[in-house]
Image (spheres, grey):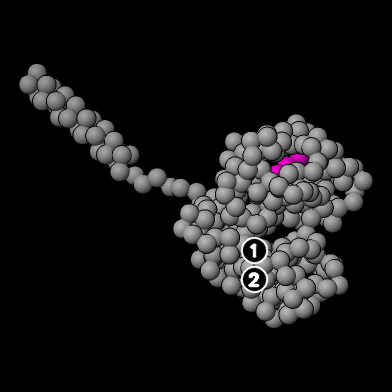
Amino acid sequence: MKLFTITSSIILLFMTVSCKNEAKKETEIAPKVEAPKPVPGTPIKFDSSKRYIYLTWDDSPQPPGTKVCKDIFHKLGVKATFFSVGIHAFDLHRKRSIDEIRNSYPEFLLANHSYTHGFKDKYKSFYTMPDSAVKDFLRMEDEFKVPVKIIRLPGCNSWVLDGEMKGQPSTEKVYKKLDALGYSVIGWDVEWRFVRGNTPVQSAEQLAKEVNNKFEDGLTVAPNAVVILAHDRMFAKPQYADSLSRFINILKSDPRNVFETIDHYPLIKYAVKDTINKKAK
């Protein structure tokens, strides 16, 4: 009887250890389930008690300014949109910079600022040849895999939103063609201006006051939303990079302020290209 009891105990112990080992193996080999990466243009829920800020930086890649801005945005935990230009990515290093922006979503969004920046700043020619202008945007989109149908026109503040179009008369033919193709065009509410030498005009405190005034006066294209325009190259020097950090920290000190990428602008059309939608399904 004792022998039977001992034998049974040994068998029970063996079975318990075996089960534990099997469970451990299953735990070890169980694949980790990662959350799907957000797709640009996916709708978000807006909070009416918040104020939405869209940092939109033009003309990337422009080293070292582009990297300086990205590093500051990342360090301070804010989202931003980079409207990029194809001819500025003339070497492997600069092309890689655009790839990094595209692959950093949802922190950063890559958007379209044309391939040639309006025929290299020849805006009159660019906007009087609307077919060529549209081809220029399409080339930028195709060559650099811009993930959203969101454009900023070079050299002018024009808007094409869901049910609303406005801008300079000279650009009308171009933005109407873009509207017919399903694109959104984004202008700006506040501009961080610069003078020769890419020196910012307003101080961080002055620009923050302009943003607050826009919110308080309601003088924005969309309610509770301010689009800020600046250029990457403005912040290449340390003293101006410090101004950018100070500006963001001032805005962050107000708990009402939320930073978002421009694909989450309230009045924007559905921004995702059909090809992206198919991949996401």
Could you tell which of marks 1 and 2 lies nearer the N-terminus?
A: 1
Q: Is residue 5 left or right of residue 138?
A: left
In the rendered image, residue 236, in percent from the top left (x then y), is placed at 63, 43
Name the image quarter holding residue 172: bottom right
Q: Is residue 179 visible?
A: no
* Along the line of sight, the residue nearer the viewer: 207 or 215: 207
Asked if the residue under mark 2 is in contact with the one under mark 1, i.e. CB atoms within 8 Å, the reply is: yes
Residue at horizontal 64%, vertical 35%?
A: 238
Q: Which mark is residue 112?
A: 1
Q: Magenta stretch mostly in which secondary structure?
A: strand
Residue at horizontal 71%, vertical 36%?
A: 243
Name the image quarter holding residue 74: top right
Residue at horizontal 66%, vertical 43%?
A: 235
Tell me the SS state at disc 1: strand
Q: Is residue 31 visible?
A: yes
Q: Is residue 65 left or right of residue 126?
A: left
Q: Which mark is residue 204?
A: none
Name the image quarter holding residue 60: bottom right
Is residue 218 a member of the stretch shown in magenta?
no
Q: Is residue 176 above or below residue 97?
A: below
The residue type indicated by label 2 comes to Phe
Q: Is residue 253 left or right of residue 10?
A: right
Q: Quadrant of the N terminus?
A: top left
Residue most extreme to the left: 3
Tell me the SS state at disc 2: helix
| Magenta residues, start to end | 255-259
The residue type indicated by label 1 comes to Asn
Report the residue marked by disc 2. 137
* Along the line of sight, the residue nearer the viewer: 22 or 116: 116
In the rendered image, residue 16, in percent from the top left (x then y), is placed at 23, 30
In the rendered image, residue 12, in percent from the top left (x then y), is placed at 19, 29
Residue most extreme to the right: 217
